[in-house]
Image: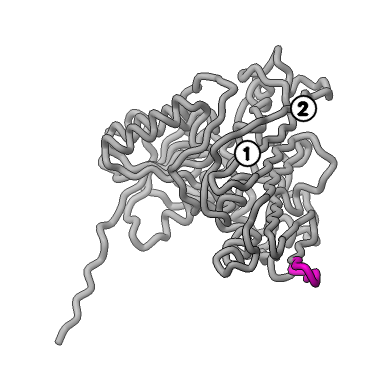
Amino acid sequence: MTLTIERPHMLSLGIVGAGQFAGSFASLFKIHPDVDRVLVTDLLPERAAELVAREGLDGAVDSFDAMLETDVDAVAIFTQRWTHGPLVVRALRSGKHVYSAVPMAFSEEEIAAIIEAVRETGLTYMMGETSYYNPATVFARKKAAEGAFGRIFYAEGDYVHDMDLGFYAAYQYSGGEDWKRTASYPPMHYPTHAIGGVLGAIPGHAVSVSCIGVRDDRGDGVFDREVSQFDNDFSNATALFGLDNGGVMRINEMRRVGYPSQIRESRFRYFGTEASLEQIATVSVWQDKQDVTDISEELTTQPSMSLDDPSLAHVAPSCARRSSRDTRRCTTRTGCRPCSTGSRAGTRAATTSSWTTSSARSSTAPCRP
């Protein structure tokens, strides 16, 4: 008897935005056994051409509109974070499945438009939040499923990423002469890493929120309302959420902070009636009513390559200046890798101070700051 195994439909994919962040995905898309063709577009044609050459992609397309006119099955959007919403909706309405870097969108209206487009088209939208696979989140999710926490009544998620540790370089790379206009991106409009690590371990969702921001006082033109595209002068923000299970979640988004972000910029704490888990920069502990157990080694990931590897040369200029002794901690949770600010493709979204959660949930992207 001959056993025939049918391969799934081979997918073709279009990358939108060829900045520093996109390359990490392009190499993975290219080697995926179910992807047969990968195209790319960027507002700067030379960046698209460079990505094609470096990763062996199948070609560059002149524009986002031209990409939507191709026969690719899906697009992966790696543009600046405030451009995601309108691009996602246009792609869905053009018959493409969509993967996008975080955040989902900039406003409640844009998020609602994405959800409506998914419902009406039947296509898939996926937001690439990484904290679902953060070691602490994985550990807490397992313990929660076992009932080891008891009832988790309070949890915290921090995204502690100081601007001095890589963000200036990232925004300068993507924003050109006017980079300070976008470097003021509101911290609480980028809450996905902090929230993802909490709700990735605790089933449920937020039902209420109160937020307080701290106005920046450095005076360098970043987080300056007179300069900011987003009319924002908050560099740090804290939000308190009520959860549908009756519990509480606190989220901190910090961009001016004396903290070694390159060691661990996403950190979490979960408190239950029977046990708890807490993290600081270099230590993670599991605690119950009798004892404290250091689980730091269990939650430490290992680098897959040296920072001197040639394939990383284009990712973040500031990484190249690190010494080899920093390799382990930097590749575990690098504080200097630019985010989706690395591309100039896309259109500018409307600005608003609102933030909302979404029922669209997924997490398969590599680490990002």
Is residue 28 a member of the stretch shown in magenta?
Answer: no
Residue 285: which disc?
A: none
Q: Residues within 10 Å of mark 1 (few under 14, many from 20)?
A: some
Residue ID at (44%, 27%): 110
Residue 214: which disc?
A: 2
The residue that disc 1 covers is 241
Residue 192: quadrant of the picture:
top right
Residue 138 shows in this picture: yes
The range drawn in magenta is 287-295
Q: How many marks?
A: 2
**Quadrant where the image shows the N terminus:** bottom left
Q: How is the image coloured?
A: one colour
Considering only vertical position in the picture, is 204 above or below 60?
A: below
Question: In x, y percent, where is residue 302?
Answer: 67, 66
Residue 280 versus residue 88: which sits nearer the camera?
280
Task: Tell me which label, 1 or 2, sits earlier in the chain.
Answer: 2
Residue 9 versus residue 112: which sits nearer the camera?
112
Question: In x, y percent, where is residue 4?
Answer: 19, 76
Question: In x, y percent, where is residue 95?
Answer: 27, 37
Measure how far apart labels 1 and 2 are at the Cα level.
Answer: 18 Å
Question: In x, y percent, where is residue 41?
Answer: 42, 36
Residue 44 shows in this picture: no
